[in-house]
């Protein structure tokens, strides 16, 4: 298993070329060490409660960029894109029975890779994602693969167009490996609300991967793809990133075109990125960002080169983040937050301080109001956005004698219970006589949340919080308790209401009996300040000691 | 299609158009407007919601001014505009015969449109139709839409309510859909008013419910389409996919500066030029005609002549070849030149007409055509007399017949002479020293005679052509002359007076031929009929007007005098006279009430309703006619008698007839021909 993950040729190659970010990746070449590390994670449950205090003898290397590695090895002709693709396809086939993160695996993976190889042969210029294996959340339209949004009503639906983000990735040479599982139309926090299958968490297959972009997070975590696209309406990128121990970024609303993203709540939806390192996430975000004439809400603001801002860890001073003002959102460490999460975040805070940041607690008085406001706004918009799934023009239609029963039966049959519940809630909130009490008040809360964030970000460069109040929980644990599940979004929804960018990166572990589970740190920035988030995240990630966020089963192979 | 992942994008053109329309309709513009979603399920709405503007439309609170057509009594009106908003169109349903399924055409779904909502200021079907056609003119003038109702580029839903006089609040409104033409708007509203009034008067007011009714063109009535259970909840909320629209003063000013002259301003300007309202409305109706007319006037052409040419021959030609005025080859410059040539006496009006058709179809310049064809008119009386003499000498047989009393052979001679002169005799001379007196070769008697249409008939003069040629044809020896066999409707205004009798006499002897239908129209003033309907604020035209039509069979139908206690025996007498003189002509009597309007309008309405070809009305010898021998200028209807008014304003040919003593013949007046003497 490991050999396929760490292709020896990569390693040779790495020693030959100096990477911007990866002088330390040379350490990475030690198979044994990695192996030991994962063993240590398994065996040292005593220490896993305080994982950041792992014995210094278990020295680990920080994550490296799979994208840059691929690029270098392709350019040096160490390896062919087809070989990389085959390697990932093999791993996908091996891991998929346990993880179930894909709804569809592309038949064109090898073909796409061959195209890249031909380009290399012809010495053509390669895009930033050339040969990069990408998973795409199923609510993002792809012209060559079914796109169902995880819903029965769109079973087998093949879009007539690529989403702008997909189109841009293809133009950059990405190899699309498949469509990842998700909660139906993004409504859920566990990926259990998918109409088709339940994805598991690669760290512990009895646990949820989070949601709604659970498939995309699990796929990256299980190394079924290098990076993936997700979508984030209330935390759907950040919470699964935290649960699966991968990096996830939710960009500023308007940074990435929503064209081709099946709308859940249009004023909150954004396409986000997953990767196993901050650099990968940055390169992917860089590729898909920018104004799109097909999305009137996409920003015309220029996109800075996000990846190039990430300084090499080689040249880091002792206090690379000196002077950076960090606000720790005090409301996120109070009641209802797991102790393990709180201590992990505190340790991460200490790490940031070590890097030179000044960390102070900030209060967002409107924080607790965000969750109900979010559920009203998102449900209201979804009740409207999902009206188009009526079975008339596409998707599954139930034959009926007359029109209203055609609508009724097609939707009753095609939509799942969670979706129906949210449509009902949203329809209610928008109804005459209730609009002012619900929708309008929720919009007022939204304004307040924006204002609070602005004040806090005027005082601080970035804000930090956990990405979720707990680590990944058991499958089915919150299935029948939607309020408990909704409460899990408390850390993330406010960011969507404010439209701000936020980066989640794994910062430590909590023990959960059989395995250690990763915990994500959320870094929130001002609008269009993704560059700063990525820079801070990159330095944090590269300097974090003693943690390696590769699920043990991925290294060892899943028990069959 | 409302595909998953598809997003709306605002077309910047629609904002520009909305601002244009808002400014043209004198609205207040919203500097910050937004879009909302209106939600309902229907297969013509692919997304399940319509993007519209709910609480902040782009323009509000305006008005539109318009002039009602003269034939409907005229008048200036101002109607309030509540709002103008932008929304997206829905798909179009296609229903097929089998009824088991319908299809929907989504090609227009998502296309932006402007919805203009008017204040409840409109009081009749006519006003609504005129309001709608003014909106059509405005959007056409602005270049915002072709305003074509058949294509659905302009659509119209109306809401109708009635209330008793004195009641402040409006009655229950009923919406009518499926209105595909202004005439449909007009009739549907009038029908709906009468339906609602009837329910009111029958004490069934509660049967008027808020519903959507469908106008059925075939049955000419409205039928229930769907009843609304209360107000539908469209669950409006702000459209999150489109940012709000922010207008700057500079943007608005820029558009304001680019606005063309709008219909209302054009009408006021044309009115000031001295044109009659009839002319003004015709010219200002069509942007192309306006442009053309303005260009002709700019070249210094006589306003009235330009109007007559455009409204007469050019309009007829356009209708005939189905072209718009900017598509014909005649440029405004050349028309101005043509008018100048006629006015300056270089060519005759007759020749002008001839080359007009050539100019319209083939192009070229007036000057070159005149030179090429040697068409400069003959004004020398000696030359004319020489031609007349030649015509008489060459046609001894006809001359014989003429002398034997076949006076109608005038037309034949006229044709011969025009042929000989190649049409170069000015019809404005109005008469010709032409009729030989029996037994002598000299031309002792002056016979007024017009040549204008003997060679080249045009619709306006059709009746002259018809009667003369048919009569000539009866002489059995004419070659190359055919009769017009098309049945026409000839309406004679029937009153118990000398003028009317004279008119009928002329019509029977000179106008009516076999196959024609003769209508005797009597307009009565039965004011008492209307009283029961004035109870309502909006009396319906249909319900309050009564038109009784009695088809008469040969052998004489009995007309019972029902309304107003007027002795209508003279109608029967007239009818019998008709049957005696023209036994093969169908004759019927029409009686119509004045409905509080003037008599002329009632006659015009009836002409239109019955598609009459020729209207004949008896004319008193008025002082102005006698002295001036010309019509009054200025387009004012005051001081003009009914006959003059009708001659001026009737869409079909109207002939005013004055009988001159027992054997004095007739003096005829039409729009084109004044004081045309026709000897008995």
Image (tube, coloured by chain):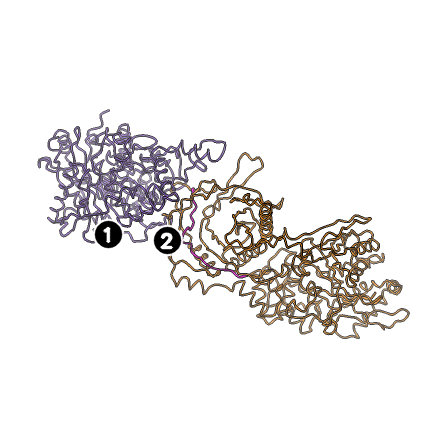
Instruction: Check residue B244 in the rendering and tell me which mark sits there, or answer none.
Output: 2
Q: Which chain is orange?
A: B
Q: B625 and A531: which one is in front?
A: B625
Q: Secondary structure at mark 1?
A: helix
- Bounds of the magenta span? B47-65
- Residue B240 location in percent, x, y? 36, 47
Is residue A463 rendered to the left or right of residue A302?
left
Determine the residue positioned at 71% across, 71% down. Answer: B630
Give the x, y percent position of residue A164: 35, 45
Identify the image quadrant of residue B639: bottom right
Which image quadrant is residue B497 in?
bottom right
Q: Is residue B389 above or below residue A388?
A: below
Was residue B55 drawn as part of the magenta stretch in this picture?
A: yes
Tell me the quarter of the image containing the C terminus of chain B. Answer: bottom right
Please indicate, yes or no, whether residue B52 appears anywhere in the rendered image. yes
Q: Mark 1, chain letter?
A: A
Image-quadrant location for residue B263:
bottom right
**Residue under pointer 1:** A454
**Coordinates of residue B522 in the picture (x, y in percent):** 73, 57
């Amino acid at each position: 298993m490991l050999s396929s993950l760490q292709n020896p040729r990569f390693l040779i190659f790495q020693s030959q070329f100096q990477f911007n970010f990866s002088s330390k990746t040379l350490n990475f070449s030690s198979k044994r060490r990695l192996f030991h590390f994962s063993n240590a994670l398994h065996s040292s449950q005593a220490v896993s409660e305080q994982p950041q205090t792992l014995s210094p003898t278990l020295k680990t290397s920080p994550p490296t960029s799979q994208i840059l590695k691929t690029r270098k090895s392709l350019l040096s002709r160490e390896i062919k894109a087809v070989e990389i693709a085959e390697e990932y396809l093999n791993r996908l086939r091996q891991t998929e029975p346990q993880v179930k993160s894909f709804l569809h695996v592309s038949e064109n993976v090898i073909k796409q890779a061959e195209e890249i190889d031909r380009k290399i042969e012809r010495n053509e210029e390669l895009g930033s994602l050339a040969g990069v294996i990408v998973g795409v959340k199923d609510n993002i339209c792809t012209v060559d693969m079914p796109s169902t949004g995880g819903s029965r009503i769109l079973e087998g639906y093949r879009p007539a167009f690529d989403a702008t983000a997909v189109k841009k990735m293809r133009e950059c040479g990405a190899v699309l490996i498949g469509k990842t599982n998700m909660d139906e139309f993004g409504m859920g926090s566990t990926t259990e609300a998918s109409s088709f299958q339940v994805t598991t968490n690669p760290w512990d297959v009895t646990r949820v991967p989070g949601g709604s972009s659970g498939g995309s997070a699990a796929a990256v975590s299980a190394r079924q793809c290098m990076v993936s696209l997700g979508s984030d309406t209330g935390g759907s990128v950040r919470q699964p990133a935290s649960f699966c121990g991968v990096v996830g970024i939710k960009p500023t609303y308007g940074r990435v075109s929503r064209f081709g993203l099946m709308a859940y709540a249009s004023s909150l939806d954004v396409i986000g990125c997953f990767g196993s390192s901050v650099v990968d996430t940055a390169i992917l975000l860089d590729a898909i960002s920018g104004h799109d004439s097909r999305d009137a809400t996409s920003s015309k603001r220029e996109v800075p080169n996000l990846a190039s801002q990430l300084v090499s860890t080689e040249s880091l001073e002792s206090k690379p983040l000196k002077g950076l003002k960090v606000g720790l959102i005090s409301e996120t460490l109070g009641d209802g937050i797991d102790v393990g999460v709180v201590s992990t975040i505190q340790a991460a805070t200490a790490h940031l301080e070590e890097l030179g940041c000044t960390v102070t607690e900030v209060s967002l008085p409107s924080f607790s109001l965000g969750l109900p406001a979010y559920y009203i706004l998102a449900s209201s918009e979804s009740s409207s956005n999902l009206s188009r799934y009526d079975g008339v023009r596409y998707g599954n239609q139930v034959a009926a004698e007359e029109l209203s029963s055609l609508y009724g039966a097609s939707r009753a049959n095609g939509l799942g219970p969670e979706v129906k519940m949210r449509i009902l809630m949203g329809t209610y909130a928008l109804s005459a006589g209730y609009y002012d009490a619900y929708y309008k008040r929720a919009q007022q809360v939204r304004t307040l949340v924006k204002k609070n964030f602005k004040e806090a970000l005027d005082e601080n460069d970035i804000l930090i919080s956990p990405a979720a109040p707990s680590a990944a929980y058991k499958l089915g644990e919150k299935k029948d308790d939607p309020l408990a599940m909704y409460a899990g979004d408390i850390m993330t929804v406010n960011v969507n209401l404010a439209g701000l960018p936020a980066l989640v990166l794994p910062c430590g572990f909590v023990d959960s009996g059989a395995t250690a589970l990763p915990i994500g740190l959320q870094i929130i920035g001002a609008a269009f300040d993704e560059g700063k988030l990525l820079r801070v995240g990159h330095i944090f990630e590269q300097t974090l000691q003693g943690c390696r966020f590769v699920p043990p089963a991925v290294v060892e192979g899943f028990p069959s | 299609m409302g595909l998953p992942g598809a997003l709306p994008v605002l077309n910047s053109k629609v904002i520009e158009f909305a601002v244009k329309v808002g400014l043209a309709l004198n609205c207040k513009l919203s500097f910050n407007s937004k879009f909302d979603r209106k939600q309902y399920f229907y297969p013509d709405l692919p997304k399940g919601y319509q993007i519209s503007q709910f609480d902040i439309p782009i323009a509000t609170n305006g008005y539109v001014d318009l002039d009602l057509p003269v034939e409907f009594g005229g008048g200036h009106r101002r109607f309030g505009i509540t709002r103008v908003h932008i929304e997206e169109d829905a798909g179009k349903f296609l229903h097929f015969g089998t009824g088991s399924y319908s299809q929907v055409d989504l090609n227009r779904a998502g296309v932006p449109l402007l919805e203009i909502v008017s204040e409840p200021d409109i009081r009749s079907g006519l006003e609504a139709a005129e309001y709608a056609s003014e909106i059509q003119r405005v959007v056409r003038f602005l270049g915002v839409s072709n305003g074509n109702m058949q294509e659905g580029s302009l659509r119209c839903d109306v809401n109708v309510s009635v209330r008793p006089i004195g009641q402040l609040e409006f009655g229950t409104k009923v919406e009518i859909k499926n209105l595909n033409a202004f005439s449909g708007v007009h009739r549907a509203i009038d029908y709906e008013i009468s339906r609602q009034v009837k329910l009111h008067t029958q004490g069934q007011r509660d049967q008027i419910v808020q519903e959507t009714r469908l106008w059925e063109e075939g049955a000419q009535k409205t039928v229930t389409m769907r009843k609304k259970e209360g107000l539908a909840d469209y669950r409006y909320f702000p459209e999150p996919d489109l940012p709000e629209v922010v207008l700057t003063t500079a943007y608005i000013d820029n558009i304001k500066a680019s606005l063309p002259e709008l219909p209302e301003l054009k009408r006021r300007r044309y009115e000031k030029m001295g044109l009659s309202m009839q002319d003004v409305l015709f010219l200002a109706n069509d942007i192309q005609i306006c442009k053309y007319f303005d260009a002709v006037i700019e070249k210094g052409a006589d306003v009235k002549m330009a109007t007559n040419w455009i409204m007469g021959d050019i309009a007829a030609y356009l209708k005939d070849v189905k072209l718009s005025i900017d598509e014909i080859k005649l440029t405004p410059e050349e028309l101005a030149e043509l008018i100048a040539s006629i006015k300056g006496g270089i060519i005759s009006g007759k020749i002008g007409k001839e080359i007009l058709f050539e100019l319209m179809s083939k192009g070229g310049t007036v000057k070159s055509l005149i030179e090429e064809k040697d068409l400069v008119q003959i004004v020398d009386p000696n030359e004319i007399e020489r031609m007349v003499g030649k015509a008489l000498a060459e046609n001894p047989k006809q001359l014989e017949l003429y002398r034997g009393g076949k006076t109608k052979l005038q037309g034949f001679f006229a044709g011969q002479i025009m042929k000989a002169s190649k049409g170069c005799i000015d019809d404005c001379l109005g008469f010709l020293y032409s009729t030989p007196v029996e037994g002598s070769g000299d031309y002792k008697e002056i016979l007024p005679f017009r040549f204008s249409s003997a060679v080249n008939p045009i619709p306006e003069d059709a009746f002259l052509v018809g009667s003369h040629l048919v009569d000539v044809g009866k002489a059995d020896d004419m070659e190359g002359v055919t009769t017009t066999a098309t049945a026409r409707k000839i309406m004679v205004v029937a009153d118990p007076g000398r003028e009317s009798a004279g008119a009928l006499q002329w019509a029977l002897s000179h106008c009516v031929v076999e196959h024609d239908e003769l209508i005797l129209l009597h307009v009565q003033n039965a004011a008492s009929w209307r009283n029961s309907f004035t109870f309502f604020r909006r009396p319906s035209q249909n319900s309050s007007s009564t038109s009784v039509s009695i088809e008469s069979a040969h052998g004489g139908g009995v007309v019972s005098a029902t309304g107003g206690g007027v002795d209508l025996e003279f109608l029967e007498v007239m009818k019998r006279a008709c049957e005696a003189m023209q036994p093969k002509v169908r004759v019927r009597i029409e009686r119509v009430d004045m409905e509080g309007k003037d008599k002329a309008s009632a006659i015009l309405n009836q002409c239109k309703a019955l598609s009459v070809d020729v209207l004949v009305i008896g004319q008193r010898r008025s002082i102005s006619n006698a002295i001036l021998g010309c019509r009054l200028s200025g387009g004012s209807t005051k001081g003009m008698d009914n006959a003059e008014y009708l001659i001026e304003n009737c869409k079909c040919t109207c002939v005013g007839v004055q009988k001159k003593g027992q054997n004095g013949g007739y003096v005829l007046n039409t729009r084109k021909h004044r004081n045309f003497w026709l000897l008995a």
